Amino acid sequence: MSLFIKLTKEQKQFMIADIQSFFSQERDEEISEFAAERVLDFVKESLAPHFYNAAVLDVKHVVEQQFSSLEDEILTLERPIKR
């Protein structure tokens, strides 16, 4: 399953450099650009969907709250009907 992530060449290069830097600083290990790109592919394919889905749920909750608030505001516009 491929996530609908479209990265520019510059974004991808920046991420690859970050991965290489992480390995260098945290693991004292130098990895090639190719190896870093494989790590990026793994993150995109295996881990990113979890973060994406969590973000979707966050957005859903925000929209629900805004809709509820808007609904409450609309209801304040109602006028009593005399019978």
Image: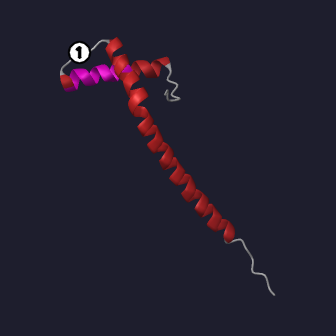
Q: Examine the rendered structure and indicate whether residue 45 appears above or below residue 76.
A: above
Q: Is residue 17 magenta?
A: yes
Residue 78 picture quarter: bottom right
Residue 26 shows in this picture: yes
Residue depicted at x 63% and y 61%: 70
How crowded is the residue under tag 1: few (<14 C-alpha within 10 Å), some, or many (20+)?
A: some
Magenta span: helix, strand or loop, mainly? helix
Instruction: Determine whether, in the image, residue 21 is placed left or right of residue 77.
Output: left
Residue depicted at x 43% and y 27%: 45
Location of mark 1 (residue): 30
Q: Nearer the viewer, residue 39 or 13?
A: 39
Residue depicted at x 23% and y 15%: 30
- Say what secondary structure mark 1 lies in: loop
- Image coordinates of residue 17 in percent, x first then y, are 34, 19
Amino acid type, mark 1: Glu
Q: Magenta segment range?
A: 16-26
Residue depicted at x 44% and y 44%: 54
Residue 15 shows in this picture: no
Q: Is residue 37 magenta?
A: no
